[in-house]
Amino acid sequence: MKEEKKSLFEKLKEIRLEKKLTLKQISQSTRIHLKYLESLEHGDLLEIPEIYDKLFFKSYLKSLDVSESDYYDQFIEYRKTIREDRTAILDITQTDSPVENEFNFKNLFYFVPILIAILIIWFLVSNTLIVDERTETVQEVSVLEVAEKIQTKIDSIKFAEIQIQKDNLITDKSKLLNLNISALERTWFRIIVDEKDTSEYLLQKGQNVSFTSEYSFDFLIGKANGLKMIFQDSTYGSFGKEGQIIKYMRFDSTGISKKILDYPLNKIRKEDESI
């Protein structure tokens, strides 16, 4: 860790200690797992899921009661040295015209086999020694090595295809995903729209909010039985039993694609009560 970046986390830790706050107390108030707070305070961002690290840092600053503007830009600069910047791939593969972009994307499947054949021929030719009159030794080429290098290139192309597909999902506003959330009782939740826009809400019973997205909603919910949702005209909820939380839940074009239920750290799981 560079010295100027390291001082950011050290300074925040000093502020926490001056305010006589423990990470356990912050974990209980923010519902962020203790191990993630420890990694965050050490600057070990790779130990934290990429989708949550900025959100966790903001919650951490809020718990310390410090101004976000004083530290968040420093955090983003440090994060860029840790997280892989994927925008470069998209900039290379995207075109200005949506029609042209769609044409290139479809024809990529026809181009890949040709590309593989060209790469194999080039690799074999460039790695073979010319036999002269004084020696008959040649350099042996491992087919496995060739295949591995080609597969790496193909994986890069596939990744670019996925990113292009995501960016082109919404060409028509009628394809937007619509979500309405109503509170069955007083409930806190955190929502991430399209893996980039994050918000927190505390709804009182009877209150509701609405959202739209291009391809996904991700959730952390304080009460699994506290919310009802209408997604694309289908009703969902409640999502668990009383006393449970939703550690992670995702809505995409298919509906609920993933849901992880858990119990709060300060409550005993029912299955453990009989032990």
Image (cartoon, grey):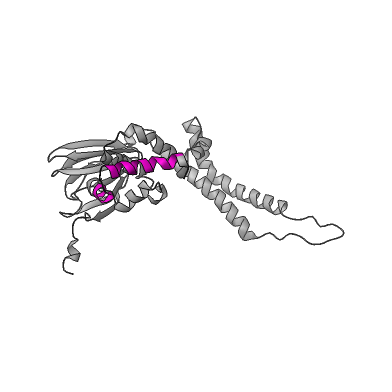
Q: Using residue 246 as the reference point, say whether residue 142 is left or right of it.
A: right
* Residue occupying the far top of the picture: 96
Residue at 61% from the left image edge and 47% from the top image edge: 115
| Screen quadrant of the C terminus | bottom left
Q: Say which quarter of the image contains residue 132.
A: bottom right
Residue 73 pos. (x, y %): 39, 34
Residue drawn at x 16%, y 47% as measured from the top left: 226
Q: Say if the magenta span includes residue 192.
A: no
Residue at the bottom extreme of this rendering: 275
Dominant secondary structure of the residues highlighted in magenta in the image: helix
Where is residue 19 shown, x and y percent of the image?
A: 26, 42
Q: Where's residue 235, x and y in %?
A: 20, 45
- Residue drawn at x 53%, y 45% as measured from the top left: 157
Q: How many marks?
A: 0
Verify whether residue 10 appears in magenta. Answer: yes
Q: Is residue 140 visible?
A: yes
* 228 lies above or below 98: below
Q: Quadrant of residue 54?
A: top left
Q: Is residue 165 visible?
A: no
| Magenta extent | 4-27
- Residue 70 spot, x, y in % from top left: 35, 32
